Amino acid sequence: QVQLVESGGGLVQVGGSLRLSCAASGRTLSNYAMGWFRQGSGKEREFVAFISRAAGTTKYADSVKGRFTISRDNAKNTVWLQMNSLIPEDTAVYYCAASSTYGVSSRQNDYNYWGQGTQVTVSS
């Protein structure tokens, strides 16, 4: 098993930036593809970003493309989500998740392990 803990959330003004971290313990992170998802108040959880095991492939939701960047360091067992040019619609609880499946995936059912989430609030 792998345990995931997100951090780095907070309150930021429109146009600002935040960097979320996801620290893994248990099995080494290199065994898993990783994803970030988010859930706004009253909304369903949605895909944000994906990164493959060796970081060779990334995928983003259209709503964050060009503003968010996912990265990882397997030696540090950590995944990051750099979020720039934040807008109020980015307000949500952000979750990192680990997937043992192969190939690019934005489907929640492909992810085996989830963190507890970190709140991001973008104020106007």
Image (tube, rainbow, N blue to C red):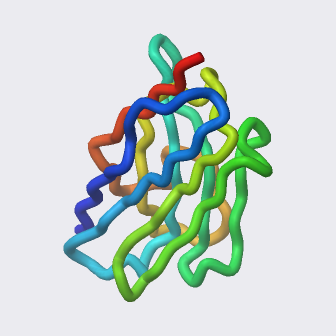
Q: Quadrant of the C terminus?
A: top right
Q: Quadrant of residue 98?
A: bottom left
Q: Camera-side residue: 58 or 119?
A: 119
Q: Camera-side residue: 24 or 118?
A: 118
Q: Residue at x 59, y 48 (%)?
A: 83
In the rendered view, would you say 80 is above or below 55? Answer: above
Percent x, y of residue 73: 46, 80
Q: Quadrant of residue 62?
A: top right
Furthest residue toward top: 42
Q: Answer with left or right where residue 79 lies relative to residue 60.
A: left
Q: Residue at x 54, y 78 (%)?
A: 53
Q: Residue at x 34, y 56 (%)?
A: 113
Q: Answer with left or right where residue 17 lies relative to residue 1.
A: right
Percent x, y of residue 11: 42, 30
Percent x, y of residue 108: 51, 44
Percent x, y of residue 2: 26, 67
In the rendered view, would you say 78 is above or below 42? Answer: below
The total of numbered circles placed on residues is 0
Q: Residue at x 57, y 34 (%)?
A: 46
Q: Quadrant of the N terminus?
A: bottom left
In the rendered view, would you say 54 is above or below 65? Answer: below
Q: Camera-side residue: 52 or 110?
A: 52
